[in-house]
Image (tube, grey):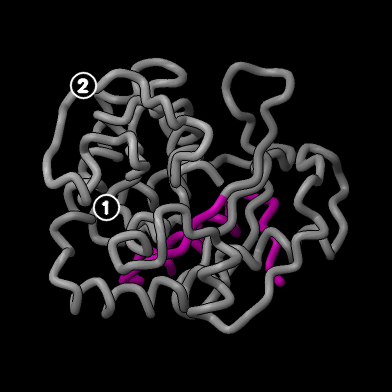
C-alpha cells in the first residue's frame, strides 16, 4: 500500500496518472467543527496503481493532485460525488472534470435510485466491503494500517465497478442521461454557496421520486426548489 506524505512523491504519482484513461477518486474528511468539510485523505487509483494521499501531512502541497483532477484528458470516477466535489470547489473555486458518478450510472442501468457502494461492489466487483472503520476520525494521526486499507479499498474496488458499468451504460442507450447529469454536477454556477448542491434542479440531482428532472419523469426543470426528499437523495452516501 502506498501512502503519500510529501510533494515530490505526489507529483511523480500524479504525473503517471495523467497518462491514464481514468482514475478512481474518493476522499475522507471531517466537518464536525467547520462549515466546510476538512479534507484529511485523498484516495486515487489509476488502472495500474493506487495511493492514499495524506492531505494533512506536514509541508505537503496538493497542487499536483488538483492539477490532475482538472486534467480534461483524464476521466475522474467517483461514487456519490456531491460531497467530494464540495471539497474541491471550496479548495480551488473549480470542479474536477470530466467525471463519471457510478451511483448515477447505476441508477441509469437499473440498479435502483440509491445504489450504495457496498451494493455495487458486491454485484459488480464480487467483494464484500469491510465497514469497520467507517466512523474513523480521519484527522487523527497516526492512522492504522487497517484504517488506511479501508480508505484505499474504496478506489480499488471503484475501478471494476466503473469498468462493468461503462459497457452496461453504452448498451442501455441512455449514456446521454448520464452526460447531462455530469454536466450539471460540474457546473460551477451551482456551487456558489454551501448547501447549493442539495438543489434538485442544479448540481447533484438525485432522481428521487420528488425530482422533476428525474429520467423517469421525462422532463427537466431548471432552478427547482430545494428537494423535499433531501434525506433520501441518491447522492447521499
Q: Quadrant of residue 15?
A: bottom left
Disc 2 crowd rating (10 Å Cα; few below 14, some 14-19, many 20+) is few
SS type, badge 1: loop
With 213 as the anchor, is 105 left or right in this view?
A: right
Total numbered labels? 2
In the rendered image, the vertical position of residue 30 relative to residue 18, given as above or below: above
Percent x, y of residue 112: 41, 60
Q: Earlier in the sequence, mark 1 or mark 2?
A: 1
Magenta residues (range): 1-26
Which labelled disc corresponds to residue 10?
A: none
| Of the two numbered discs 1 and 2 in the rendering, the one whose residue sits closer to the viewer | 2
Q: Is residue 121 above or below residue 94?
A: below
Q: Nearer the viewer, residue 220 or 95?
A: 220
x then y, percent, for residue 1: 71, 72
Image spot of residue 117 (x, y percent): 55, 62
Residue topped by disc 1: 98
Asked if the stretch drawn in magenta spans residue 185, the answer is: no
Pick whichever, 145 or 56, lies toward us.
Answer: 145
The x and y percentages for residue 231 are 53, 33
Q: Residues within 10 Å of mark 1 (few under 14, many from 20)?
A: some
- Quarter residue 171 falls in: bottom left
Q: Is residue 23 shown in magenta?
A: yes
**Which residue corresponds to mark 2?**
223
| Near-viewer residue (30 or 217) | 217
State the CA–CA distance, disc 1 to disc 2.
Answer: 23 Å
Q: Identify whether 32 is placed above or below 209.
A: above
Q: Residue at x 41, y 30 (%)?
A: 89
Q: Secondary structure at mark 2?
A: loop
Q: Name the residue at 34% across, 41% down.
A: 209
Amino acid at each position: 500500500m502506498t501512502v503519500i506524505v510529501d510533494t515530490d512523491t505526489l507529483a511523480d504519482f500524479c504525473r503517471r496518472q495523467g497518462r491514464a484513461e481514468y482514475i478512481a477518486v474518493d476522499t475522507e474528511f471531517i466537518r464536525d467543527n467547520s462549515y466546510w468539510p476538512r479534507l484529511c485523505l485523498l484516495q486515487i487509483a489509476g488502472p495500474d496503481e493506487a495511493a492514499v494521499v495524506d492531505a494533512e501531512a506536514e509541508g505537503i502541497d496538493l497542487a499536483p493532485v488538483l492539477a490532475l483532477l482538472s486534467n480534461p484528458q483524464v476521466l475522474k470516477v467517483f461514487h456519490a460525488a456531491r460531497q467530494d466535489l464540495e471539497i474541491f470547489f471550496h479548495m480551488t473555486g473549480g470542479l474536477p472534470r470530466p467525471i463519471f458518478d457510478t451511483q448515477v450510472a447505476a441508477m441509469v442501468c437499473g440498479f435502483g435510485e440509491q445504489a450504495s457502494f457496498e451494493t455495487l461492489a458486491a454485484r459488480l466487483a464480487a467483494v464484500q466491503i469491510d465497514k469497520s472503520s467507517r466512523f474513523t476520525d480521519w484527522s487523527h494521526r497516526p492512522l492504522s494500517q487497517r484504517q488506511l486499507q479501508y480508505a484505499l479499498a474504496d478506489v480499488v474496488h471503484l475501478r471494476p465497478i466503473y469498468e462493468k458499468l461503462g459497457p452496461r451504460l453504452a448498451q442501455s442507450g441512455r449514456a446521454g442521461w448520464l452526460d447531462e447529469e455530469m454536466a450539471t454536477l460540474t457546473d460551477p454556477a451551482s456551487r456558489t454557496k454551501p448547501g447549493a448542491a442539495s438543489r434538485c434542479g442544479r448540481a447533484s440531482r438525485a432522481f428521487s421520486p420528488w425530482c422533476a428532472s428525474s429520467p423517469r419523469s421525462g422532463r427537466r426543470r431548471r432552478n427547482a426548489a430545494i428537494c423535499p426528499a433531501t434525506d433520501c437523495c441518491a447522492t447521499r452516501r
